[in-house]
Image (spheres, rainbow, N blue to C red):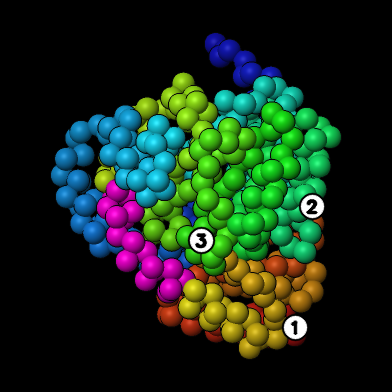
Amino acid sequence: MSRPPFTPTVAALPKLVPFVGPEAMERARGRPFRARLGANESVFGPSPLAVAAMREAAGENWKYSDPESYELRAVIAAYHEVPVECVVVGEGIDGLLGLTCSLFLTPGSPVVTTDGAYPTFNFHVLAHGGKVHAVPMRAFREDVPRLIETAKTVCAPLIYVSNPNSPMGTWWTAGDIAAFIAELPPETLLVLDEAYCDTAPEPTSPAIDVSNPQIIRYRTFSKAYGLAGARIGYAVGERSTIEAFDKVRNHYGINRVGQLGAYAALRDQDYLKGAVAQIAASRNRIRAIAEANGLSSLPSAASFVAVDCGADGAFASRVLTGLLDRDVFVRKPVAKGLEHFIRISCGQDEDLALFAGALSDVLASVHA
């Protein structure tokens, strides 16, 4: 007996997991991490109003979710002062990126992104048969002018930009992004991933313009809102573009508990402000810990800090391994030019105390 063959696109893909989850690492290690500082989750958690809404919703989880996510879309639309038809909800930004590729890519389509930027986008591009054109970072941030020039050269239908950037935490200002949008080549769509916009200084995000069909803005409840496990993200854009998502999305792919939790979280902006303040304080402490150990770090607008280990990628990998061995989960970039950094997510005081102790111990060990 045999099954039908995979499509040529799938058959040609290597086995790829964009991120190895901490749970898989814990299974392999045979013990849990004491500090979980690698996945850019908000350990400060969601709004108590969101928790209460989800707890109440759990008893009615026998119901399917609203396939239109109408109430959630309506509150998002009101928040951004756009029509509800200009908002689509998806399974986090990751799910929406995959749907975007479904809408705009055919086998061989060129797509422009940054070498070392969020790798899951590349995963979706390749799965849809697209060809990735990766531009190196410049000064540890995405070189958007060169991305645009590359898109013009290869006639790319999509350009991916994350602002603030993952994994470095660097950013462009709102004025910069607006100027870049004005320079987009015709028939090119800017995929603007703003997962970390809530933790960024003002002004980082330009005003949303749903009359422009050349840009889609992607937001999430996974970061500052503390709802990573709910898997709720959304995109805002020109109406006909957003409505096309209905042709390809999984209409029952959003869980009802997550819908209601995100609805309550968005309405509790006071809690969000407090969480963002805690994230900013945590960033400052991570930078101080790095400095106390003779290391430097990049200014960050995200919920993590990129710390320069001061040598090459092999040295940074030893630091990373040492931290993991000491039960502190962190990650590191792997792209050329970025590999000498490690990346630490913001955490509670007790998490960062464990990180500080482990880092001092690891550096003493690897230097020895």
* Image location of residue 345, percent across then percent down: 53, 67
Q: Are marks 1 and 2 in contact (CB under 8 Å)?
A: no
Asked which secondary structure carries label 2, the reply is loop
Cα separation, mark 3 vs mark 2, equals 23 Å
Number of residues whose C-alpha sits closer than 10 Å to that of mark 1, classed few (under 14), some (14–19) or many (20 or more): few
> Of the residues tagged 1 and 2, which is closer to the observer?
2
User: What residue is shown at x 76% (from left), y 53% (from top)?
Assistant: 143
Residue under numbered circle 3: 40
Q: Which image quarter: residue 104?
A: top right
- Magenta range: 261-279
- Give the amino acid type for the residue marked by disc 3 in the picture: Asn
- Give the amino acid type for the residue marked by disc 1 in the picture: His
For the residue pair 167 and 22, the one nearer the viewer reads as: 167
Number of residues whose C-alpha sits closer than 10 Å to that of mark 3, classed few (under 14), some (14–19) or many (20 or more): many
Number of numbered discs present? 3
User: In the rendered image of this protein, does residue 85 appear above or below residue 137?
Assistant: above
- Give the amino acid type for the residue marked by disc 2 in the picture: Pro
Mark 1 or 2, nearer chain start: 2
